[in-house]
Amino acid sequence: MRESRGAQNDKIQMSSLSIKNLHVSIGDKEIIRGLTLDVPKGQVHAIMGPNGSGKSTLSKAIGGHPDYTVTAGEVLLDGENILGLEPDARARKGLFLAFQYPMEIPGVSNANFLRAALNARQTEGEEVEATEFYAQMYAEMDKLEMSRSFTARSVNEGFSGGEKKRNEILQMAMLKPAYAVLDETDSGLDIDALRIVSAGVNALRGPQLGVLLITHYQRLLDYIVPDVVHVMVEGRIVRSGSKELALELEERGYDFIKDELGEPALA
Amino acid sequence: MSTETVSQIDIDRTRGDFSYPESHTFDAGTGLTKDTIDYISKVKGEAEWIREFRHRALEVFKSKPMPTHWASKDLENIIFENIRYYLANGQKPTRSWDEVPEDVKRTFERLGIPEQERKFLAGVEAQFDSEAVYSNIKAAVGEQGVIFCGSTEGLREHPEIFRKWFGKVIPTGDNKFSALNSAVFSGGSFIYVPPGVKVKHPLQAYFRINAENFGQFERTLIIADEGSEVMYMEGCTAPKFETATLHSAVVELVAMKGAKIQYVTVQNWSANVFNLVTKRAIAHEEAEVKWIDCNIGSRLTMKYPGVILKGRKARGEVISIALASDGQHQDTGAKMIHAADETTSNIVSKSISVGTGRATYRGLVHIPKHLKGCKNNTECDALLINSTARTDTYPAITVRGTGNSSQHEASVSQISAEQIFYMQQRGLTEAQAMSLSVNGFVNDLVRQFPMEYSVELKRLIDLEMEGSVG
Ligand SMILES: Nc1ncnc2c1ncn2[C@@H]1O[C@H](COP(=O)(O)OP(=O)(O)OP(=O)(O)O)[C@@H](O)[C@H]1O
Ligand SMILES: [Mg+2]
């Protein structure tokens, strides 16, 4: 397979999150229907698309959620197909999902959870040092303007919608992934929180991180400026372009793209 | 499993899933008849009154039906005729591990007992099948007049104390299994703490089943005399056999005026042991009895530690943690019988059901009308990990009289596949995710345990979760 491709192509794949002709079903229903996408390290790609087009499904399938069956295609992380790996193994390889609806974990404190997640990344028998851990966590919390009281509270339990989203970015900052899929991290955030959380993501931006940003609102893209914008309709990427594509969508809605594509193309 | 080398001790220790070939000098054979009882009595060289006590108990056992009208039908799978009721080698428990037969000694070494003894215990008794093989108490504790030995020795050497309380807290006919125990009991601990003596470190007993098709029926009696204090800890394991094994103990505690007893159990039987245990205490005036009961293993556990609050201002407490993994049923709870004014009781029960595991809480709190100033607090929390898990709560609280109060809270929380996925996405394995949830759930209770036991419990939970994801 490899030899048929150009060296240039290989290089890109070696440092990118690369999704190829992906098909994903939930039960009998196919949701992702031949999706191809490449997010190189160092770039931010946004995905916009109507409700129910499969954006969250894509994110969970990449993460290895057991309910989502991949029927065809590949997901390559720095060139390695991760589809056979358990969700935790994918995470330890540097994949992070910020969930649209973060789970509450009763009885497990935010601090303990983060520590356990970091310890899971250490070599067997080693643990992160406690004082260093707390210093780092507090620093990241300060950046996100999160009160210290969140460390002792159970993960996301009773958090407001916006607090949960902030907590996702705190986890991302602590776990330092190579690739992050942020699923509507902006929804539910008030104006100040949007600015703070965006600043948090921007602070993590750099040559070592690739981001796939799922959003409905072009306003987020004013804060986190994407390199590429993709439009997803009914389980496929139907259009890719620059940031201006988002503005166009905002003005004209998704219908113009659907119209351009015509119904048969989507059947 | 007996082919494993000693170097693997650390890996294998906790599960206790290994056994050495059997060689028993005394074997009562399978089945239970009058002859079985005469055999046991004769081997133990018992007084006539004990033999008669056993025979009467056998009659009671036979006459009582299985409690399947309220309890699990799984009880019907106990085939009493196939069980061996007494297995021993005839040697007396030694005070030195060096005198314990080599394979038995190795068993306990693999379970870490001698090491724990050196580290933090005031005394240890180790029972292998029917009899104690080792029993020792630190000299300083013994010099204070504390008696700690097996029940066989207790009956022989201290009949004046033993007989006074034996069968008084839990009468033979209390239930079918207390009657069975009364008929064939062997082993278990006998402890007497003289007035005012506070035993600083825990006394520990370890119950080990090594033989297949076997029933272990230990009988424990602890008497804390006026103003004394003692903590007792029991652990138990058995190898995984193909056929079911029966463990049916009776434990009686007596806390005299102002005395304090803490009784800690970490039960880690293998998944085919029927663990049917009757545990009860009498607390006299201003006495305190606390049962800390952790049930991790077994196929079916039925156990409801109780306190009869007999003297004014007596206090009873049951703190229980039950973990029911695939195929297990933990049917546990507590009984608080208030029988004097100003008595207080506290029950905190936390159960975890994983997969097809099932946890049942049964509580009984009784405060009669004529009493004044009695209080009960009951808290039952259940954690369900994945959807097939099942939990039932049957709290029976009868509080009569206007000067008495009871507070009852119950909660059920779920760890869904969605929550496990969330944690896995952060890099934790499925087992780690489950362990973290379970440990978080029981954390506030575990903090009350002595440090060594909370570490042990955490480790057992981790292992159990690893086992449950397969
Ligand atoms: N567990 C599930 N069982 C059945 N159908 C599901 C399940 N999860 C998602 N779906 C369906 O799959 C389709 C895509 O859902 P998905 O959540 O991926 O959409 P989305 O693009 O993220 O939408 P939104 O913008 O509203 O978040 C929807 O029709 C949804 O109802
Ligand atoms: Mg979505």
Image (cartoon, coloured by chain):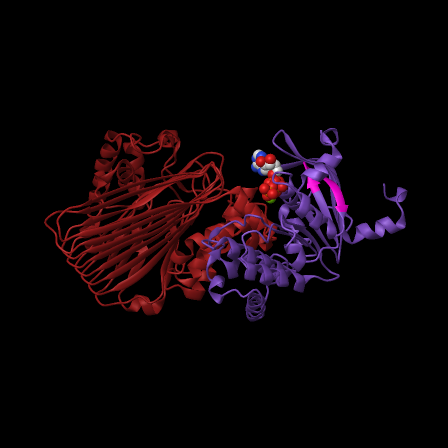
Q: Is the stretch drawn in magenta largely helix, strand or loop?
A: strand
As drawn, is B441 to the left or to the right of B151? Answer: right
Q: Residue at x 54, y 44 (%)?
A: B418
As drawn, is B208 to the left or to the right of A163? Answer: left
Can the viewer see residue B111?
no
Residue A234 highlighted magenta (yes or no): yes
Which residue occupies the extreme front position in the image?
A251
Can the viewer see residue B123?
yes
Q: Quadrant of the N terminus of chain B?
A: top right
Q: Quadrant of residue A203?
A: bottom right
Residue B7 highlighted magenta (yes or no): no
Please state which of residues B158 and A73 is positioned toward the viewer in this rendering: A73
Which residue occupies the extreme left position in the image?
B370
Work out whether B115 lies above or below B172.
below
Please state which of residues B239 and B127 is positioned toward the viewer in this rendering: B239
Work out whether A254 lies above or below B76.
below
The chain shown in purple is which? A
Q: Position of residue A107 (x, y in %)?
A: 45, 54
Work out whether B32 lies above or below A86.
above
Q: Quadrant of the C terminus of chain B?
A: top right
Q: Position of residue B222 (x, y in %)?
A: 27, 55
Q: Quadrant of residue A115?
A: bottom right
Residues shaded magenta? A232-240
Q: In the figure, what tint was chain B given?
A: red
Q: Position of residue B432 (x, y in %)?
A: 55, 51
Q: Position of residue B338 (x, y in %)?
A: 18, 50
Tell which quarter ligand 1 is in.
top right
